[in-house]
Amino acid sequence: MTFETEQQMVANIKDYIIDNIPISQLTDQELEEKVEQVTEQHLGGQYVPIEQRVSIVEQVYSSIRGFGLLDAIISDDTITEVMINGPQNIFIEQGGHLFKLDKQFESQRRLEDIIQRIVGLAGREVNQANPICDTRLPDGSRVNVVLPPIALCGPTLTIRKFSKEPMTIAKLIRYGSITQEIADKLELLVRAKYNIFICGGTGSGKTTFLNALSNYIPKDERVITIEDSAELQIEGVENLVRLETRNANASGAGQITIRDLIKSSLRMRPERIVVGEVRGGEALDMLQAMNTGHDGSLSTGHANSTQDMLSRLETMVLQGADGLPLEAIRQQIASAVDIIIHLSRLRDKSRKTMEITEVVGYRNGQIELNPLYVFEEDENSTLYKVSGALRRTANQMVHRNKLIMTGIREEI
């Protein structure tokens, strides 16, 4: 049976079930059994491989109760990202490489129905008046939706798959992102409540690294996490409050921003504030929180280097406080941020920690940086494979006061 014939069969069976069976009165299991029966009737005596029969049943069932074609893609743990550019163009990321699937949605209307179901599950809205939406799937996967007329190629859906197992430092070591020695040093910095910023480009693993690092937070502390769509998996902390932003409704009311949540979190007696990503005016509130006794805060931001992260922070603070002198902004950043960790996705698609830098202070109109670890390629590197490691620089760590106050005597 060809792909086109299979899709036509799926559509016919689905139409028959919707027209002849009271699906709202059936449980999920009863509906699945009914789909199997009707599929057998429609196939009759013709030979169809068992894999294809199972596929037809799954597609019919998921088109009624699930996310249709997406169900099989989402359930595949080897797929890390899904990109849908209209009903006919589906791309996936697998093993760090992009592929186009030879599958498509039966119509634009069907894709729009699935998008509305996904968005509705998280209590959000997306329509022509509000055509852009960030949300998440029930398993925590990050979802971005853009509808026509903004998206010219049709409804556009991007899903960053959510790992079923929380990311740990041990996994980062296994993947070669960092070494055990550096992991031990990072644990000391987190325990000593250094304010840490993780930066990198799109897909460099910022949220993954933040998630792993956040599991070094002592289990007896009160932690507030603030995210656009909840992704962090902090294990073992009982006194944990998870906050998530909310989009405005169709009438433009009810929006809750990251900035609102940071302000609110300061009245919740936090010992740590973990912000999933800072990308706008909320940077000012985040820096002020770091500067007013909320040490040990963790966050991420988009930037191509540690120096670039400082420039981005300056720009973001200006969005939140237009007219603030640049000198005051730089002093605020220099006193708030202690450590910047830069991640990158390299030419061989591997994700590496490129630099761990200390923010020393503000002098002569500039923020001073003190690189502690820098990634260096070795002689085994080729055009297609990156080989190397983070090397300790000759620079001594300047601000050791937090380590000393925590009772840590080890050198970083």
Image: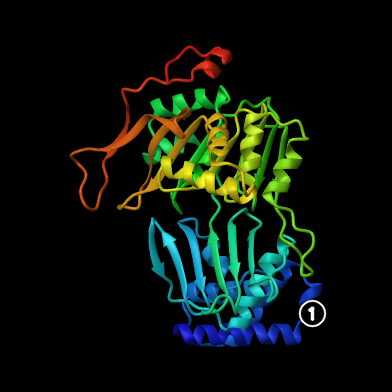
The residue wearing badge 1 is 22
- The C terminus - image quarter: top left
Where residue 275 sits, quadrant-wise, is: top right
- The N terminus - image quarter: bottom left
**Image coords of residue 235 (percent x, y):** 62, 36
Instruction: Name the residue: 58% across, 25% down.
Output: 193
How busy is the neighbourhood of tag 1: few (under 14 within 10 Å), some, or many (20 plus)?
few
Residue 217 in sight: yes
Tell which of 77 and 42 is nearer to you. Answer: 77
Instruction: Name the residue: 76% across, 76% down.
Output: 23
188 displayed left or right of 296: left
Q: Which amino acid does label 1 sit on?
A: Pro
Examine the rendered structure and indicate whether residue 109 appears above or below residue 203.
below
Tell which of 349 and 95 is nearer to you. Answer: 349
**Image coords of residue 354 (percent x, y):** 37, 39
**Image coords of residue 308 (percent x, y):** 43, 45
Residue 278 in sight: no
Tell which of 218 and 253 is nearer to you. Answer: 253
**Image coords of residue 150 (percent x, y):** 58, 75
Instruction: Name the residue: 51% across, 71% down.
Output: 84
16 displayed left or right of 382: right
**Furthest residue in direction left, as rendered:** 379
Element class at badge 1? loop
Where residue 391 sits, quadrant-wise, is: top left
